[in-house]
Amino acid sequence: MTGFEKYRNGAGPLGAFLILILMLVLFRGLDRAPVDLIPASAPTEVFSGERAKAVMNHLLQENRPHPAGSALNQVVRGRIQTRLTELGLESEIQKHFKCSAVAPSCAFVENIIAIKKGTDTSADAKAILLTAHYDSAPTSVGAGDDITGVSAMLEIAANLRGTPALRNDIIFLFVDAEETGLNGATAFAEDSPLMAKVGLVLNMEARGVAGPSVMFETGPNNLNQVAGFKEGAATPIGSSLMVEVYKRMPNGTDYMIYGQSGVPGLNFAFSQGVALYHSQLDDPAHIDNLSIQHHGDNLLAMVQVSGNKDLNALPAGEDATYIDLFATYLVSWPSSMGPWLAALALVGIFLTARTQNGFTLRQVSWALGTVVVVMIALPALGWLVSFPLGQMGTLAPLEHPAPWPGRITLVALAVLVGGVGGSLAMRKAGVLSLFSFVWGLYGLGGLALAFLLPGISFLFLLPALVVGVVGGVMSFIAKDIALKWACYAGLLASTYIAIYNMFMMGTVFNFQVSHFKMIPLLLLALPLVPVVSIWRDENVGVVRPALFGVAGAALAGIVGGMLVSGYTAERPRSVNVVYHSNKITGDHQYQIVAYGKQDHSYLAAAGFPEEKKSYLQYGAVPGKGYFIPAEDMNLASPSVTIISDTEEEGRRVIKGTIHAGRAAQMMGFGFVDGSILQGMTVNGHQVVLRKKAAGSPELVWLHGAGDTNMPFSMELTPGELKGMSLFSLGAYTNTAQAKKLQALRPNDAAPMHYGDHSLVIAAFSVK
């Protein structure tokens, strides 16, 4: 064979390579919202991200945190109300003290409610609840989370002002105290008569400062909800896999409260730049205006589509299975159709296989072995590259500021494993057995998931259906090439799904857990096995050089991942400085708290020891941390006043008041053994307690109480009470030592969540 003949059939590999590159380029768009920014000069009925950003700048003009209960949060609340008045909407404040429905946490709540009336005045008329929360995390300006949503709501109110009234009422709910445990949403759901009128919830959230607005959660029986999203959104992004995953995660948004009662809804969020989530840098300057635009485009479209529909008919009898196609079209079907589509795919795969000669049991065994090896090898390689890509475990748990070297590495390894598997297995297994086993596995997997977890079934079902339709049709019109083109079509569909989900995982898993990020890439590696076996069977000479090139790309990506910085000033690591005043032990110390790996050079420069010290967080939760001695700042201690201590029905009931002793943002109770706490109310409201095994600690949080006395009642197991504490969190200290620790903090680090603060711990002693 001449050199020319050896490479004459290289069009297949070259085409596959170019499609893969094109797909990666197109997926690059997931790092930003796929929309154009509409200027402020646009007509008022059109959502303008530029106008919404101006509203954000006005609401957050102090550029400081405004957590629930703070004075600045009241200022932000007033500005929202003023803007609503300017838009011709009357607003009211739903003022409550409310304990969370999901955590042992209570807070003062001031929800803002305004209604744009619809034309339907019938008794059973339903309304659309458009909602976002306006409070921030304790150290965050809260621009992304969630004033972006608030600003979008105010712009949508302006968009609707000059347009004909819709059929359904639009309830604008600006929720307070989301960050404290969804307290504001709980107050609205449990105490507002408007909740009974809600037929659809549209919630806006953010877990970062950039990226597309993704529809990641729906209500139950979501077929019609998803159909509305498909009808209205011009650039839809979301999949039923996200819904299935999110409902199993421990965290939640305000929609969690409404969804628990079965109210239909769609939940939207952007999540790029997650390193700035709940940090000081979550401010207007760091918000991508395109994310505001995409948020608003999605929500305004949903209001317009749903505003004239009968919301009583919105709950369907089933869910939808769906995934977007490059944010241009939502591929969807009723979940009940899944088994039938899987059956159709299997029939098409069978017809495609019949175009070739049969295979032996030995060949099937080799095909099985190849698939098993690929499924083991790819996560194993992911685990190995986790060390260099994860910079030996020093990365933050979430997003990487420069993800492309790691992405290229993982995709290249998936191609390499699938390519080598197909190349080596071709002679022993044969093309037909590899095709039949891989795509039979897809078809059967899609069928099983269509019954068990229909929201996930598209991972296998959609590529299998593409293979079945293409191969089945071509088996009648072009038998000789049916199997090859079916494999190509299946590889294309499966590669899209693989890379889509790898990108989506980027804000949840960083590269130090690359083995998890490799799991969706199995959907790239497995279909590549029969494709490469076809090329090897046809003596395509470029396969081996191509695999060497892919290996080189993976190696280059590994080197690049080791060299790029895992943290930058714009995507910093999270490092807080905390002043501890422990009145129980008499210790006064500074602590460096990091989310992720500690920066030991910072610890050394600040004079911290190399070894961690054991301590009780909030006087109750065992932990280890880095401490240095500090002067006693004489901060006032939290205290309780016992009003009564009785025994009722076999339980010890203690009633009293708790007082922070200073203007604290938060205070609470700590229990070394949470199982002794059988029940509790604060200010007359029941506290939701986690069921604790004996010896497991429990914390009960009170937010925004300031320097007031809060009444409480707790039910405890009888006997001697030990290991109970009080704590309060307030402003950071202002000593020379405190300022030095802040000044030494590296430029690639920033406070997050509670930020730099002071913590006072005192004993809760009861005889």
Image (cartoon, helix red, strand yellow):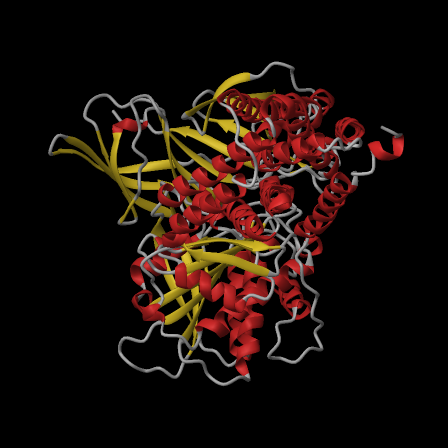
Q: Quadrant of the N terminus?
A: top right
Q: Position of residue 316 (x, y in %)?
A: 34, 62
Q: Position of residue 70 (x, y in %)?
A: 50, 53
Q: Residue at x 68, y 53 (%)?
A: 32
Left or right position of 54 against 716: right
User: Measured along the vertical axis of the image, is residue 370 above or below residue 712?
Assistant: above
Left or right position of 602 against 592: right
Q: Residue at x 39, y 51 (%)?
A: 340
Numbered marks: total: 0
Q: Nearer the viewer, residue 189 or 9?
A: 9
Q: Nearer the viewer, residue 294 or 590?
A: 294
Q: Quadrant of residue 563?
A: top right
Left or right position of 121 against 53: left
Residue at the far left in the pictured view: 649
Q: Position of residue 101 (x, y in %)?
A: 33, 47
Q: Quadrant of the C terminus?
A: top left
Q: Residue at x 69, y 20 (%)?
A: 607
Q: Position of residue 83 (x, y in %)?
A: 55, 73
User: Measured along the vertical axis of the image, is residue 76 above or below residue 399?
Assistant: below
Q: Residue at x 43, y 51 (%)?
A: 341
Q: Is residue 24 visible?
A: yes
